[in-house]
Amino acid sequence: MSHVWRAPEGMDYVIAAKGAPEAVADLCHFSDSQQDEMMSVVTRMADDGLRVLGVARSYFREAGLPSQQHDFTFEFLGLVGLADPVRPTVAAALQDCYRAGIRMVMITGDYPGTARSIARQIGLVQRDEVITGPELDIMSDEELQQRIRTVNIFARVVPEQKLRLVKALKAIGEIVAMTGDGVNDAPALKSAHIGIAMGGRGTDVAREASDLVLLDDDFASIVRAVKMGRRIFDNLKKAMAYLLAIHVPIAGMSLIPVLFNWPLLFMPIHIAFLHLIIDPACSIVYEVEPAEADAMNRPPRDPKEPLFSKRVLLLSTLQGLSVLAMLLTIFGVCLARGQGELDARTLAFTTLIIANLCLMMTNRSWASTIGKIHRAPNAALWWVTGGTIVFLGLVLAIPFLREIFRFSVIHPVDVVICVSAGILSVVWFELFKLFTRKSV
């Protein structure tokens, strides 16, 4: 790049050029020996982590300016080394990526020495092997796809070559996230599975071509977004698992009494009461559930993996069946003992509410037991749990509400039975988590 100024003392022009040292040396018509001497200095500066620019100047005294920079007679002034310190958050964020099974590739226009120096500072793995832009130009697509499996640094790369690198990574089956900020980065950002533009210094074209825009231009924000995505995916699975598990006993206790000619357990008000618990649990409790402790210590999931896998379906159904079995036992025993419809409904429904709360708690994590889960803060859980217990207590204690729900008076021993039965219905899943965790 060259800028032209009119000299203040006359009609002369002053031309200042800056750019890659090789380009500036070409403007100054360096000999081979001069070029080699300059590049040895450039290499030393690059190895110190500096970004290197060449600087030259020229004077022009004629009336019309030439159309090309090469028509000026430039005088080489020297080299400028620019230090661009790495943000202190990058090294830790990069290690988080490695623990999460994410491969990192550096693509830069800087010299290989500069790239290696930055790679050492941030802890990039496999930083000894570098492919430069000129080397990239002479590689076939097949050779690049082989080399790109192990090479993590690409230096002296022009923006147009980023698109080729993205296509090569996609060709070997990688899910590619690409960062960029310039107009020339737009094709690569568009081609990547996830294009990430810089919101601070990025161009409008780059932002429009991207899927995500970083407001703070900080690499650590990408890592936080990955962790948030994993938390959201996990919480969706937890909410769906809980939803399936709790509806198994609801459906079962709606159908089985009809088949065996028993009194009905549920009336519309009971279903409404249950959904006052179920709906906030799915939409609020699991939404604010913090990320699992190992969220960033496991490899990325298969993109083809369904949200509701066979394992989730099986374990959720078993949770619901265990609650259903407990409800049938209590309901059937009450009827067999001649306690009547009201007693049977009171004990079975109370047991279902307790089991519902236990399901909500145990599904907060499929890796940690309830005792460990409770260390993670979730205010919404306690609001829903507290509200449920208070409302259930009012229904059981106030005659008017008991009559609406068609309940009988409950005794302390009945409360103990209901609480114990509700807890026992999910104990097996807690033991399952404990056993599988130890096995792993």
Image (tube, grey):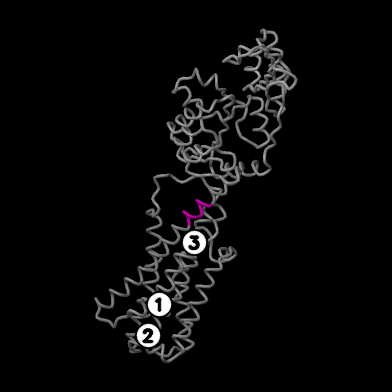
Q: Earlier in the sequence, mark 2 or mark 3?
A: 3
Using the image, tell me which numbered label, if any, was put on residue 273. 1
The local secondary structure at tag 3 comes to: loop
- Verify CB contact (< 8 Å) between mark 2 and mark 1: yes
Name the residue beneath numbered marker 3: 287
Q: Amino acid at mark 2?
A: Phe
The x and y percentages for residue 366 are 49, 59
Name the residue beneath numbered marker 2: 405
The local secondary structure at tag 1 comes to: helix
User: Alpha-carbon neighbours of circle 3 within 10 Å: few (<14), some, or many (≥20)?
Assistant: some
The x and y percentages for residue 158 are 54, 25
Measure how far apart labels 2 and 3 are at the Cα level: 31 Å
Answer with left or right where residue 260 lies relative to residue 208. Answer: left
Up the image or down, 116 lies above or below 86; here it is: above
User: Alpha-carbon neighbours of circle 1 within 10 Å: few (<14), some, or many (≥20)?
Assistant: some
The local secondary structure at tag 2 comes to: helix
